[in-house]
Amino acid sequence: MNWIEVISVGPGDTALMTLEARQALDRAQTVCCAQRHRALVPPGVPVIPMLPLEDALPSLAAQREAGLRTAVLVSGDAGVYSLLGLLVQRFGRDALHVLPGVSALQAFFAAMKRPWQAARVLSAHGRALSPSALCHAVRTERETVLFLDDVRDPHWVREVLARGGLAHARMTVGDRLSYADERVDAYEPGRAYPPLCMVLVENDAPESGLPKIGLADESFCRGKTPMTKQEIRVQVLSALGLAPDSVVWDVGAGTGSVTVECARQCPLGEVFAVERDDEALELIAENVRRFHLLNVNVVRGEAPGALTGMNVPTHVFIGGSGAALDGILDVVLALPGPVRIAATAVTMESAACLTERMQALDGFTAVQLAASRLERIGGHTMLRAQSPVFLFAGTKEEKR
């Protein structure tokens, strides 16, 4: 069969190429590869530059259709953060013959004389790895290993971990892996690292899963801005039903208490905290820093006008709205969906508006929540009632 041969060429030193990979490369009639792999191509064999990919893929297809033995060279092992997934998507599995190889991951752990099967493997090499996703992995795993590049280098990792409250994590860096001048040692703040190195981050006290919801009110910086209290916040989070990769709009974010709770539940996603009040904006920023959150975008402005230019949400919470509630709902209910919506109200007027506008949503629910807290007053213990809150929720289905 006239396959496209996907050849794993190892981490760098040609001594780590397999015999099968060498033989496949020798019989290739045309080769697609990155600039750094051109020296591996036998003399006289035409080379298709791998970048830009939008040009390389059609060229690959044309060469194969012409009956030529076509090869694609990938660093390390084809199964570890390579172009293999894209090639499968473009050509289908039946069109490919994949030759495995030694990855930089294997070379790194071999140099450290330790197993790697328990490590969480991530890549920041030309991929969309967010600071929040990195911190979530380090927070919940004992070992996290990353492929890096010339932009997201070991210094970037150190800075992200410091902002994410994980400055205690240890870092080991491997660079020039498999070459004679290979270095594997502890991270050094002032050192210039070459591109395409790897880093192992170790956390001796990993946490399990996502944080619990229902932070104590006293843990927030509050000021005079109204805040969604703990008892209500728990119900709001329950009604939203977030996933780790959710994109959330918190409209009328106030002190940011719901923003913080949401951001802690979707470390692979992001939260947009929309607020118009200057004091509240300062409180949101302070609370975001206090909880070391790297996935919150604070949006200054008044809704509904401010609800533009943000990523399309999977979830929306409407807290503070005032007289703009109808306009906010116009925007939210016009979203392409599916979108899970939760909203609170403390006035009958807002409750009536939310009932009218949201009752057609799938799984619509409405509940009034009232809580009383135990307090010591004048030498006696009493329950002091908090203001009742209406909570509405429903799902806007995808437009057909």
Image (tube, helix red, strand yellow):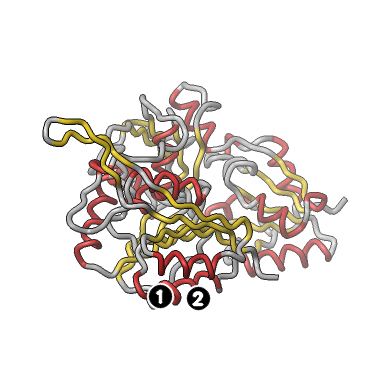
Residue 174 visible (yes or no): no
Please state the horizontal and vertical placement of residue 20, each as a whole percent of the image: 72, 37
Q: How far across and down, in percent of the image, does residue 273 sit?
A: 36, 61
Height in image: 240 above or below 65? above
Report which residue position mark 1 lands on: 304
Residue 218 numbered mark, or none: none
The outermost residue toward the left is: 378
**What element does badge 1 sit on?**
loop
Relative to 340, does residue 7 appear above or below in the rendering?
above
Give the mark nearer the N terminus: 2 vs 1: 1
Q: Position of residue 283 (x, y in %)?
A: 22, 56
Q: Is residue 129 something one can see in this rendering? A: yes
- The CA distance from mark 2 to mark 1 is 8 Å
Which one is nearer the viewer's eye here, 141 or 325?
325
Instruction: Identify residue type, mark 2.
Output: Asp
Single out the residue that lies furthest toward the right. 1
Circle 2: element type? helix
Whether residue 10 sits left or right of residue 252 in the image: it is right
The amino acid sitting under disc 1 is Pro
> In the displayed structure, does residue 43 sit left or right of residue 201?
right
User: Which residue does the image show at 64% across and 63% down from the upper left?
Assistant: 397
**Badge 2 density bin: few <14, some 14–19, many ≥20, Cα 10 Å:** few
Q: Which residue is mark 2?
A: 330
Q: Residue at x 69, y 62 (%)?
A: 46
Rendered location of residue 90, percent (x, y): 72, 60
**Quadrant where the C terminus is found in the figure:** bottom right
Q: In front here: 374 or 132?
A: 374
What residue is at 61 percent from the left and 66 percent from the top? 360
Badge 2 vs badge 1, beta-carbon distance below 8 Å: yes
